[in-house]
Image (tube, rainbow, N blue to C red):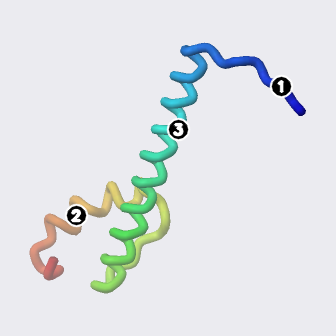
Amino acid sequence: MRFVPIKTAEQQAILAVHRARQGFVKARAAQAHQLRSLLAEFGMVFPQGIRVLLRAVPMILGDEENGL
């Protein structure tokens, strides 16, 4: 059996922050994928990457001729 040292409260807090951040990153990626697929249904295809969508969304919302 392998024994590991007990973590301090500070170490546990840092691990909790990392876990929470990883959850936020996964949720953000999932929303980006969902938005990209919904836009693809309207014929607007964008490359992968959250930065691409962050730049494109204001232009899409500002265009009154796209039907969205």
Q: Which mark is residue 59?
A: 2
Mark 1 residue element:
loop
Position of the N terminus, as image quadrant, is: top right
Kind of residue at badge 2 = Met
User: How packed is label 3: few (under 14 Cα within 10 Å), some, or many (20 or more)?
Assistant: few
Residue at the image point whose x is 42% and y is 67% from the top? 33
Asked whether 63 or 10 is in front, the reply is: 10
Residue 41 image offset from top left, x and y in percent: 32, 85
At mark 3, the secondary structure is helix
Residue drawn where x is 61% and y is 14% of the image: 8
In the figure, residue 12 lies in which quadrant? top right
Give me the C-alpha separation between circle 1 and circle 2. Answer: 56 Å
Report which residue position mark 1 lands on.
3
Residue ranking furthest to the front: 1
Taking the image as shown, residue 51 lies to the left or right of residue 61, namely right
Residue type at the position of mark 3:
Arg
Answer with mark 2 or mark 3, whichever residue precedes in sequence. 3
Q: Are marks 2 and 3 in contact (CB under 8 Å)?
A: no
Marked residue nearer the N-terminal end (1 or 2): 1
Residue 63 image point, x, y percent: 15, 71
Q: Disc 3 marks which residue?
A: 19
Q: Which of disc 3 and disc 1 is earlier in sequence?
A: 1
Most extreme residue toward the right is 1
Element at label 2: helix
Work out whether 28 lies above or below 45: above
Residue 59 in which image quadrant: bottom left
Nearer to us: label 1 or label 3:
1
Residue at the image point whose x is 51% and y is 22% from the top: 13
State the residue at coordinates (53%, 33%): 18
